[in-house]
Image (cartoon, grey):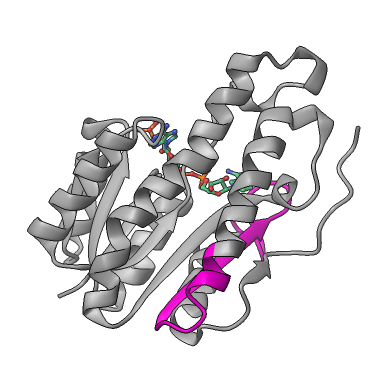
């Protein structure tokens, strides 16, 4: 069995992703800061017949992230798919002129250093396996900076550049790199932005290995 590692495994998109990829036979490694919450989610998934385990890590602490991914591959099987989708903290969503150096630094740690640490940890295993996918999930500010959300706009811009360069660097290898952009909010029941619809989209990105960037909906013009 190979493993799908979800970095940012909460009850919204995280759970929908876990169920979608779990249904396809992958083991699920659930990673977020709270061991209690990922354990509770893992228990629900296991009760429904899936293979899942929770690992606590903070994406702003690369060592904890590397340790979680290492344990997951040892306990559940080699990581075939990685999704980087932690929910940004509220201090990353402040207006530009109210954002301090600390706010921006935290957003860059979250959106750039975290992905770099995670990818370095899983890449050799995917090469050994001979296949893999690395998926990034971002809001619209990843491709259209919005001064109201300064931290995420700056952090996501770095993450977008990193992901796009990673896609270039791995173009001759059997490892797909993709980025899903979700403009606006995730909306339960919505035709395009329900968590299960988004999870289906991410499954297709992994299975079909098409374009690098996929939009959940057209990019909205954000109010200023
Ligand atoms: N929610 C939306 O409306 C929306 C809109 C556009 C784009 N998106 C994107 O969709 C993705 C998922 O969002 P979601 O709301 O559906 O999330 P979710 O699946 O409910 O959970 C995301 C999880 O990220 C974890 N997290 C936050 N900070 C973390 C950190 N520093 N280290 C490790 N884990 C951390 C949180 O768990 P802990 O608190 O336990 O760490 C949270 O449960 C994100 O990439 C987000 O940018 C969401």
Percent x, y of residue 141: 73, 45
The relative height of residue 187 versus residue 1 in the rendered view (above or below) is: above
In the depicted structure, whether residue 135 falls above or below residue 139: below
Q: Is residue 169 magenta?
A: yes
At x 34% / y 60%, what residue is drawn? 18
**In front here: 47 or 185?**
185
Quarter of the rendering occupied by the N terminus = bottom left
The residue at the point 18 percent across, 68 percent down is: 78
Whether residue 14 appears in this view of the structure is: yes
- Which residue is the extreme one toward the left? 75
On screen, residue 51 versus residue 90, left or right, reads left
Where residue 38 sits, quadrant-wise, is top left
Q: Is residue 178 left or right of residue 154?
A: left
Asked if residue 188 is positioned above or below residue 180 in the image, the reply reads above
Residue 80 image offset from top left, x and y in percent: 29, 71
Point out the image quarter for the C terminus: top right
> In the figure, is residue 141 to the left or right of 104?
right
Is 47 placed above or below 222 here? below
Per the rendered image, the range of residues in magenta is: 166-193
Q: Position of residue 8 (x, y in %)?
A: 40, 44
Residue 3 visible within the image = no
Residue 167 screen position, x and y as percent: 55, 70
């Amino acid at each position: 069995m190979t493993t799908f590692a979800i970095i940012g495994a909460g009850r919204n998109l995280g759970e929908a992703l876990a169920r979608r990829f779990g249904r396809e036979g992958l083991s699920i490694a659930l990673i977020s800061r709270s061991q209690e919450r990922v354990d509770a989610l893992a228990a629900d998934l296991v009760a429904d017949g899936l293979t899942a385990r929770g690992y606590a890590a903070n994406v702003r602490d690369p060592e904890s992230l590397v340790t979680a991914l290492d344990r997951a591959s040892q306990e559940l099987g080699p990581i075939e798919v990685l999704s980087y989708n932690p929910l940004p903290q509220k201090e990353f969503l402040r207006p530009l002129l109210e954002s301090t150096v600390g706010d921006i630094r935290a957003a860059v740690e979250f959106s750039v250093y975290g992905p770099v640490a995670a990818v370095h940890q899983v890449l050799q295993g995917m090469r050994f396996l001979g296949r893999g996918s690395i998926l990034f999930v971002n809001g619209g500010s990843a491709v259209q900076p919005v001064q109201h959300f300064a931290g995420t706009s700056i952090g996501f811009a770095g993450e977008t550049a990193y992901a796009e360069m990673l896609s270039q660097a791995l173009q001759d290898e059997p490892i797909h790199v993709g980025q899903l952009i979700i403009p606006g909010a995730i909306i339960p029941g919505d035709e395009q932005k329900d968590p299960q619809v988004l999870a289906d989209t991410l499954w297709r990105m992994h299975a079909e290995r098409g374009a690098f960037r996929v939009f959940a909906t057209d990019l909205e013009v954000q109010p200023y």
